[in-house]
Image: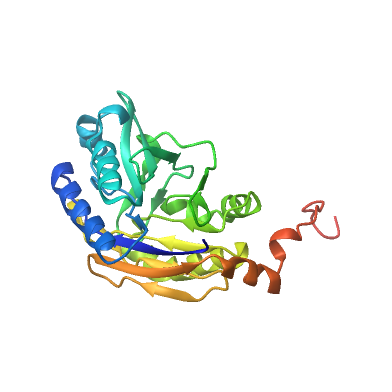
Amino acid sequence: MTTFTAGLVQLTSGTEIAANLETAAQMVREAAGQGADFVLTPENTPILDPDHARLLSVVPAPDDHPAVKGFAEIARTLGIWVLLGSTAVKLAEDRLANRSYLFAPDGSVAAQYDKIHMFDVDIPDGQSYFESKTFRPGERAVLAELPWAKLGLSICYDLRFPALYRSLAKAGAQVLAVPAAFTQFTGQAHWHTLLRARAIETGCFVLAPAQCGEHAQGRRTYGHSLAVAPWGEILADGGEDPGVTLVEVDTAKVDEARGMVSAITQDRDFAGPVTANS
């Protein structure tokens, strides 16, 4: 099989885990009811709270996390593949991880990935984000097997680091997942361009479910969950509001795109850089 239907869930997650999970579960079921074989949710699906001290006090360890248990049950009940785009999980009293979980149709965890690149920025809209104060960055790229394709995992700010995606593609990835909570300010400037670039550079499909709207403490996210083809065409755009976007993915298009431009196999070693005339 090379063809499947992906469902991109777009949310406006708040600070209450139970309420967010109820909304997310309803939308996953909606996507499955419309024929999705594989449903993906955004970064920070169970809780999006800028108050890191509060996160540390309310987020449980992985084995006790209601999102992990709940999404496992959803996948098993619906008999589909589900990517919990990410959730904060507690590793120690003062440290969290931002972790994606891929669930198989039997409810088992098929793969998990910890966000490698921490979002440590001051944005001109007045917002500051310093994930590394609370989150422990991941150290390993992760590739997972779906029935239709190999899936490369990533989360949000990873998108700005193309070497990660090239390494995943060279290891066999045909589809790249980019669950995100891109800010409104950076999203309107860069979101579409970066996602299309990652697809074109790797010859992969890119599936990017996103947070949208206004969250706690006035944080705003961009939305526009995207599906991008290996040649760079935008196949689906979820717009600005919560909802489900479905897209047909034919992984035969990966070989087609790479056959036209085979840059993924044409790396050359080079020296430098050096300063000219030095």
Residue 155 position, x and y percent, is 43, 50
Q: Residue furthest toward the right?
A: 277
Left-right relation of 218 to 185: left
Task: Give the quadrant of the C terminus.
Answer: bottom right
Q: Look at the picture and state if 179 lies above or below 109.
A: below
Q: Considering depth in this image, is 90 or 187 the residue closer to the camera? A: 90
Left or right: where 100 falls relative to 9: right
- Residue at 69 percent of width and 74 percent of height: 260
The residue sitting at 38% across, 40% down in the picture is 99
Which residue appears at 31% of the width and 65% of the height? 35
Q: Can residue 7 be seen in this view?
A: yes
Rendered position, 203 above or below 161: below
Q: What residue lies at 39% left-to-right and 44% top-to-bottom?
A: 104
Residue 212 in sight here? no
Q: Where is residue 139 in the image (x, y as percent from the top left)?
A: 53, 36
Nearer to me, 149 or 202:
149
Q: Where is residue 48 in the image (x, y as percent from the top left)?
A: 24, 48
Total numbered labels: 0
Q: Position of residue 100 (x, y in %)?
A: 39, 44
Most extreme residue toward the top, as rendered?
93
Instruction: Give the image's coloring scheme.
Output: rainbow
- Name above or below for residue 99 compared with residue 264: above
Closer to the camera in the image, 96 or 50: 96
